[in-house]
Image (cartoon, rainbow, N blue to C red):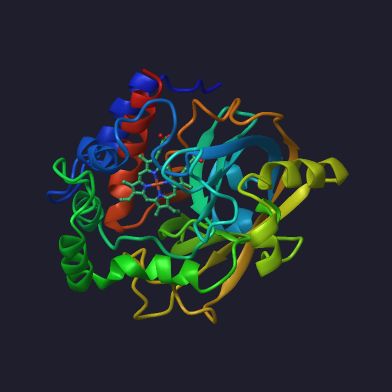
Amino acid sequence: MKTHLTLAALLATTMLAAAPAQAQPSPEELVNAFEGVLGPIRTSRPSHPKGYCATGHFTATPDGTRLSVAPTFSGQRVNTLIRFGVAGPNPQGASDVARSTRGLSIRFETQAGDVWEMANISAPIFGSPTPEVFVQNLAVRRPDPATGRPNQQAIDAFVAANPAVTLQGRWLASMAPPASFATTPYWGVNAFRFRGQDGQVRIARWSFEPRAGVERLTDEQVRTLGPNFLADELRARVGRGPVEFDMVLQFPAAGDDVNNPTIAWPADRPRTTVGRLMVTAVEPGPGGACDPVSFMVLDQEPGVTFSDDPTLAVRAGSYAVSLSRRLQ
Ligand code: HEM
């Protein structure tokens, strides 16, 4: 029976696993970059600070079992700890009617004790093409101590030189916010390698597609619902029956960029449904059992391993650093 790692061991292992091939910002530098803009991390996450804990289970489809030898895809029921989150500077500032990302974070725990974690967002792309640009993008937004505000000219010059940092914001601005945590797709964004039962390794990105269909807020709802309706809406929905998502893999074609998370692959690329996530209970308050978990985007070797997307190499380590600061 495998046991869960302690935070200290997790920090050590993710640092080793995240050892970059070439100089990249360290996990501490990435978390420091968040703190430069948001202030010191206290109890809430620097990303998706508002969130609600839920539980459920996941079962792979026969295609999932064929496409990945990871324990999560065995076809047996796998228990899940889930966190639905809302992006924003802090829990109070994260509004449910904002054109920002919602999060679906999942910790899969097989009956044999294998653990796999991931964090997904309600946009197909990320806000930075590389960890270096991620740090620079936050650094240029640090408030100037003299004025208490960031230097807008410096931000404009940075954005002009790095237009990829605008792509996610433009995608989010182009459509209304989700009407429910249960009616938006969530994307894993980064590409991973899947080793199938045939021994073949395939690059893929995943998404979680709502079985309830996609539904977005009307202008009237944006005006009237207020900033905190999503959790109660989800609780009421789960009270009527499980909320379900299909986990879908998308495979690139020759020439698709697999290492840049600001570029989505065209919609016509082949897709296969590899599993079904059922959300069966939502905790009553904000936070709960998912609070001390960072959903740090792990390999599940040998069935799911990191691609060469440089973002992946630093994510797990920075999540561990952030978690350790939150728990101090
Ligand atoms: C350079 C790249 C990235 C860095 C440095 C980074 C860093 C972080 C950190 C430090 C946290 C807080 C962890 C905690 O305190 O528990 C976090 C949370 C989160 N990140 Fe990232 N992240 C990156 C990329 C991404 C991408 C590509 C996605 C989209 C798939 C993503 C989605 C999320 C979500 C949904 C959460 C909230 C997780 C939760 O519910 O607890 N991040 N990120």
* Residue 268 to residue 214: above or below: below
Regarding residue 32, the answer to whether it shows in the image is: yes
Q: Position of residue 211 (x, y in %)?
A: 74, 60
Regarding residue 75, the answer to whether it shows in the image is: no
Q: Image quadrant for the N terminus?
A: top right
Q: Position of residue 204 (x, y in %)?
A: 47, 64
Residue at x 31%, y 58% (from the top left corner): 309
Q: Quadrant of ligand 1?
A: top left
Left of 1 or right of it: where is 170? Answer: left
* Residue 286 to residue 62: above or below: above
Left of 257 or right of it: where is 173? Answer: right
Q: Image quadrant for the C terminus?
A: top left
In-front residue for pair 35/17: 35
Q: How many marks?
A: 0
Q: Position of residue 289 (x, y in %)?
A: 60, 25
Q: Position of residue 200 (x, y in %)?
A: 46, 62
In-front residue for pair 19/183: 183
Please tell me in which quadrant of the rendered image residue 85 appears: top right
Farthest residue toward the right? 240
Please tell me in which quadrant of the rendered image residue 234 appears: top right
Farthest residue toward the front? 147
Residue at x 32%, y 27% (from the top left corner): 11
* Residue 326 to residue 118: above or below: above
Please tell me in which quadrant of the rendered image residue 89 appears: top left
